[in-house]
Image (spheres, rainbow, N blue to C red):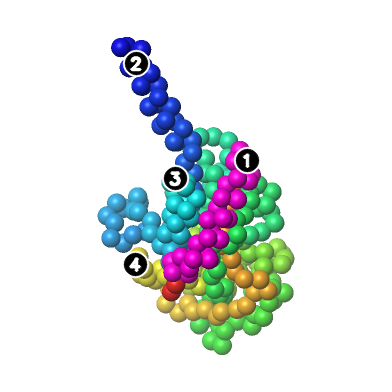
C-alpha cells in the first residue's frame, strides 16, 4: 500500500513538472502599449493589474490553436530582450511579443510571421513647429534633437548615431521631455499614444501633436523566439502555422479591427 502511495505521488509530481516545462513563458513590456496590451481599468490589483488588449487576445488565440499553455510576465523591455538572449535559467522568457524586426536581434532570436501592423508617426510640439517639422525621410533626422525610448528600434528612421538624441525610459516620459523642450521630434507608432485613453488620461501632453509618414516597408510586429530554446525552431513552426490559420479564417482581423 505504501508503494502504491509513493507511486501516485511520483506520477502527480512528474505530471506537474512536465506541464510546467511545456508552458511557454512570454515576456511583455511592463509599459502599456495600447490598444495591444495595457492594464485592465476594471482591475483593482494596482501594479498587478491584468493585461488586456488586441495582442493579448491574439496571443491567447495563437496558443489555443497551437495547443500550448502560456503565461505572460511583465518586465522592462530591455530585460525581456536580455532574457531571450540568455535563456538559460528556469523562469527566463522563451518568447516575447510586440517586437519589431531588426538584424541585430536575429543574432539571438527567431521572428515569426507578422502578427499586426501599426501606423508610423512623428510627434512634435505645435509651439516649436506651427507648420510641422521639415522631415521627409531618415536623412533629415540628424537635423533634429530626437527623443528615443530605450530598447526601441529606430533603424528605419535614424541612419546616423551622430545626431543629437535624448533617451527616455518610456514613451510617456519621452513625450513629457518633448513638451519641456528637451527634444524636438519623437518617432512612434500612433496607436499606443492615441490608445492611452483606454486606461486613463492621454499620455501626450497638451500641445503635442503628430504627422503620419510612410515607410518603405510596413511597420510590422512579430513574436520573437529565443534561439537558445531547445525547441526554438519547432515553436516558430507551430506559432507560424497558428498565425497563418488565424489570418485565413479572419480571426486576426476581427481581433485587431479598430
Estimate the x, y position of residue 184 in percent, counting from the top left: 57, 74
Q: Main secondary structure of the magenta part?
A: helix
Judge from the rendering whether residue 169 lies leftward or rightward of residue 159; answer left or right: left
Camera-side mark, 1 or 4: 1
Contact check, label 2 and label 1, Cβ < 8 Å: no
How far apart are the alpha carbons under marks 3 and 1? 20 Å
Closer to the N terminus: mark 3 or mark 1? 3
Element carrying mark 2:
helix
Residue 60 numbered tag: none
| Crowdedness near tag 4: few (<14), some (14–19) or many (≥20) residues, C-alpha within 10 Å | few
| Crowdedness near tag 1: few (<14), some (14–19) or many (≥20) residues, C-alpha within 10 Å | some
Identify the residue under disc 3. 69
Judge from the rendering whether residue 141 lies leftward or rightward of residue 174; answer left or right: right
Identify the residue under disc 4. 200
Identify the residue under disc 1. 228
| Crowdedness near tag 3: few (<14), some (14–19) or many (≥20) residues, C-alpha within 10 Å | some
Q: Based on the displayed image, in which of its 4 quarters is residue 87 positioned?
A: top right
| Residue at (36% x, 12% y) in the render | 3
| Crowdedness near tag 2: few (<14), some (14–19) or many (≥20) residues, C-alpha within 10 Å | few
How far apart are the alpha carbons under marks 2 and 1? 39 Å
How far apart are the alpha carbons under marks 3 and 4? 31 Å
Is residue 218 in view?
yes
Contact check, label 1 and label 4, Cβ < 8 Å: no
Camera-side mark, 3 or 4: 3
Identify the residue under disc 2. 4
Q: Based on the displayed image, in which of its 4 quarters is residue 44 positioned?
A: bottom left
Camera-side mark, 2 or 1: 2
Judge from the rendering whether residue 157 lies leftward or rightward of residue 132; answer left or right: right
Amino acid at each position: 500500500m505504501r508503494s502504491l502511495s509513493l507511486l501516485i505521488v511520483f506520477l502527480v509530481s512528474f505530471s506537474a513538472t512536465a506541464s510546467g516545462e511545456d508552458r511557454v513563458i512570454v515576456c511583455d513590456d511592463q509599459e502599456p502599449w495600447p490598444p495591444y496590451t495595457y492594464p485592465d481599468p476594471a482591475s483593482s490589483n494596482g501594479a498587478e493589474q491584468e493585461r488586456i488588449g488586441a495582442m493579448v487576445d491574439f496571443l491567447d488565440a495563437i496558443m489555443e490553436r497551437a495547443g500550448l499553455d502560456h503565461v505572460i510576465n511583465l518586465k522592462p523591455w530591455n530585460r525581456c530582450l536580455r532574457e531571450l538572449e540568455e535563456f538559460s535559467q528556469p523562469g527566463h522568457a522563451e518568447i516575447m511579443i510586440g517586437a519589431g524586426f531588426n538584424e541585430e536581434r536575429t543574432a539571438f532570436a527567431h521572428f515569426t510571421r507578422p502578427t499586426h501592423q501599426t501606423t508610423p508617426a512623428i510627434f512634435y510640439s505645435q509651439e516649436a513647429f506651427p507648420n510641422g517639422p521639415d522631415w521627409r525621410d531618415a536623412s533629415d533626422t540628424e537635423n533634429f534633437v530626437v527623443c528615443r525610448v530605450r530598447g526601441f528600434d529606430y533603424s528605419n528612421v535614424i541612419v546616423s548615431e551622430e545626431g543629437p538624441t535624448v533617451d527616455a525610459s518610456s514613451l510617456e516620459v519621452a513625450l513629457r521631455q518633448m513638451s519641456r523642450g528637451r527634444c524636438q521630434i519623437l518617432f512612434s507608432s500612433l496607436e499606443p499614444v492615441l490608445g492611452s485613453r483606454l486606461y486613463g488620461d492621454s499620455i501626450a501632453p497638451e500641445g503635442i501633436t503628430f504627422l503620419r509618414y510612410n515607410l518603405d516597408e510596413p511597420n510590422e510586429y512579430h513574436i520573437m523566439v529565443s534561439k537558445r530554446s531547445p525547441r526554438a525552431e519547432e515553436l516558430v513552426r507551430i506559432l507560424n502555422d497558428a498565425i497563418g490559420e488565424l489570418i485565413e479564417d479572419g480571426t486576426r482581423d476581427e481581433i485587431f479591427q479598430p
